Image (tube, rainbow, N blue to C red):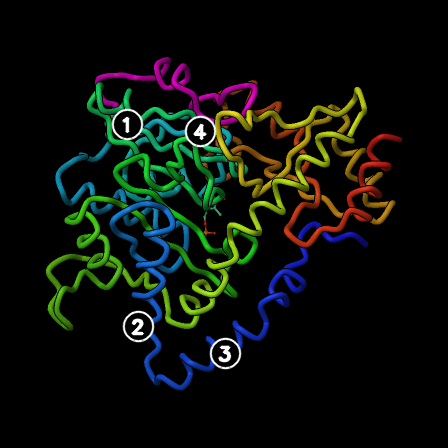
Amino acid sequence: MIQFLDLKVINAQYQEEITASILNVLDSGWYIKGTSVSSFETNFANYCGTKHCIGVANGLDALILIFRALIIQGKFQDGDEVIVPANTYIASILALTENKLKPILVEPDPATFNLSLEGIRSKITSKTKAVLCVHLYGQLAEDVSGFCEEHNLLLIEDAAQAHGAKNKEGKKAGSFGIAAGFSFYPGKNLGALGDAGAVTTNDKSLAELIHQLGNYGSEKKYHNSLKGLNSRLDDMQAAILDVKLKYLEKEIIKRRDAAQYYQQHIQNPKINLPQWDPEVKDHVFHLYVIRCKERDQLQQYLNDKGIQTVIHYPIPPHKQEAFLEWNQLSFPLTEKIHDEVLSLPLSPVITKEEQNQIINALNEF
Ligand SMILES: *Cc1c(COP(=O)(O)O)cnc(C)c1O
């Protein structure tokens, strides 16, 4: 079986260094808010080109904490509208509803499936306060930072799939808006060995507030000036992430090469390939997503040939049972995307032999 993503093989590449880093934390006797966390925060901020990084427990919390902090700073009121792509992962939406903000779902760009300026313009009202853009599949969404500034909208990024994605000026995901949320879920391009996440920002007071909110709202131990939550990155995960961060650029290149290989060799009129423009931005290919009208048959066919694929995602947020109040809404493009997409195996350790097997199967479908 060709696995969709073989995390064991990916992490085995760094086994010695990861083991040493874990033993270091073990030996230190300090497991929360220690030096491994601050070291990783510094390194990841540098990598993203931002002044600050705050480690948190996971990607959803990163986004929840950003909006919670902005509310405390008086930038939002209950019920304010935030524009968000309709075809995102549910976490982007939950970060808003958890904070009593109103998600305004927008159809994505039909070529990239990312939020576009056109989509934002079509949904702006006097209650719109912010845009939550998602760099889906690892491709930067259209840069709307200038537009948001002009229209007095806060721009927040969900960069959970886009560590290292950049434009031709070298500006990276996580540095376009007021703040960005990252996930280090094991399957992400920079993955921990458990749950982990981070916020990046250039705003010092926002960084301090998020740090405090994620640590019970306390600045000084047992003095709680805010109603916070417990959402901390732990030192073990931080130490592991610090090792893997060193190899992220190399892994991105391998992902990109593998994506290009698919792009050049998959030839089947029934299959639509992803679109990106390497002259404009560097896609990091968290996912290589094809589309096919007979998607479910294709997935079964590949499975029978020993090729594991995944659907990202089978049900759009507005059709989820958790959002019954939206179930009647219609987003035709978003619904079509969810009916047709299929993610092929793609990772820094995928081999040419595996890719050839997948390509042959696809071309014969
Ligand atoms: C993975 C992901 C998240 C959430 O990250 P967790 O660490 O699983 O909480 C948020 N947004 C997007 C787009 C994601 O892919």
* Left or right, residue 48 beside residue 249: left
Label 3 sits on a secondary structure element that is: helix
Mark in front: 2 vs 1: 2
The picture quadrant where one finds residue 265 is: top right
- Placement of 215 over or under 252, stated as above or below: below
Chief secondary structure of the magenta span?
A: loop
- For badge 1, the amino acid type reads Glu
Disc assigned to residue 81: 1
* Left or right, residue 159 beside residue 129: right
- For badge 4, the amino acid type reads Ala
Q: Nearer the viewer, residue 333 or 234?
A: 234
Q: Nearer the viewer, residue 52 or 222?
A: 52
- For badge 3, the amino acid type reads Ala
Asked whether the viewer can see residue 231, the reply is yes
Q: Nearer the viewer, residue 146 or 194?
A: 146
Quadrant where the image shows the N terminus: bottom right
Q: Which residue is mark 4?
A: 141
Magenta region: 106-128
Say if the magenta span includes residue 19. no
Task: Decide which of tag 3 and tag 4 comes sooner along the chain.
Answer: 3
Task: Decide which of tag 4 and tag 1 comes sooner along the chain.
Answer: 1
Disc assigned to residue 35: 2
Disc assigned to residue 20: 3
Q: Residue 345, how many percent across, how many down? A: 70, 45
Quadrant where the image shows the C terminus: top right
Label 1 sits on a secondary structure element that is: strand
How crowded pointer 3 is (Cα within 10 Å; few <14, some 14-19, many 20+) is rated as: some
Residue at figure coordinates x 24%, y 31% from the top left: 154
